[in-house]
Image (cartoon, rainbow, N blue to C red):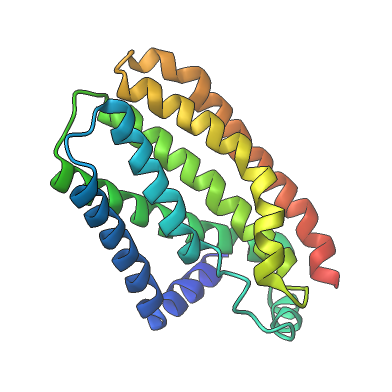
Amino acid sequence: MWQIVKFFLREEWKGKYAVIGVLLYIFTAVLISYLTVQGMDKVQYASVFWIIVIFTTLQGIAKGFMQMRKGSFVFWHQMCSPWQFLAARMLVSTLLMMIFTAFTFLLFVSMHGSVDMSYSGFLLTTFLTGMGISSVFTISSSIAAKTDNPGVLLPVLTFPVILPVLLVGVKAGKKSVDDLGFYTLTGDIAILLLFNLLIVVLGIILMKFIWKE
């Protein structure tokens, strides 16, 4: 599996212009928010940050299976098991999501300044939410890649699944912004971890059937 992870990382490096493009989208979105919404309060601070993270990073993490030709599955079927392939793809997508999120956070703080909130709790919930979103998009793109219109089907498959993850993540993020204490986040963090585990387990189960198509 680690060899497959290395292979996917090399592929991402070869196509690094796509990753650079996502970073440019993030920079543009943060710059626009800085020019249009200055002097934000805590609620606006968290809301704009979440909007930028979600809508600028999806392009970078949703392309995992979308770029694969249908014949590529036959090759990978002979090289590894379904769960190894899916786990490797999900690890790479999670790593990319964490890089995009950290880059967004650094830009956001440098342009908008800092506010009085729990940054450790806010980043933790953001990373956990990003892990869940990247896992869902990885699994959904593996299903959509088998169809004739993957770009149209992908949002339909992902939105109902990522909505609970987003609701819990935004709720926990608001608690961090309000600086209510880390102990108030433990329940939401546990739910996010369970969501992520459930998504991975369901993805491994579904991948067996997708693999055979």
| Image coords of residue 39 (percent x, y) | 17, 34
- The answer to whether residue 82 is above or below residue 183 is below
Q: Quadrant of the C terminus?
A: bottom right
Between residue 213 and residue 35, name the one nearer to us: 35
Residue at coordinates 31% horizontally, 65% vertically from top-left?
23
Residue 194: give x, y in percent of width and height: 61, 32
Specify the quadrant of the image occupied by residue 55.
bottom left
125 left or right of 148? left
The answer to which quarter of the image holds residue 99 is bottom left
Q: Is residue 81 visible?
A: no
Instruction: List x then y, in percent, for residue 9.
Output: 44, 72
In-front residue for pair 64/46: 46
- On screen, residue 107 above or below 183: below
Residue at the extreme front:
36
Label tally = 0
Identify the residue at image location x=27%, y=24%. Answer: 118
Which residue sits at x=36%, y=77%? 16
Figure quadrant of residue 90? bottom right
Asked if residue 209 shows in the view, the reply is: yes
Residue at x-position 25% and y-position 55%: 32
Q: Is residue 103 left or right of residue 53?
A: left
Does residue 172 sit above or below 165 in this rendering?
above
Looking at the rendering, in which quadrant would you find the N terminus? Answer: bottom right
Picture layout, residue 129 above or below residue 61: above
Tell me residue 74's x, y (percent): 76, 82
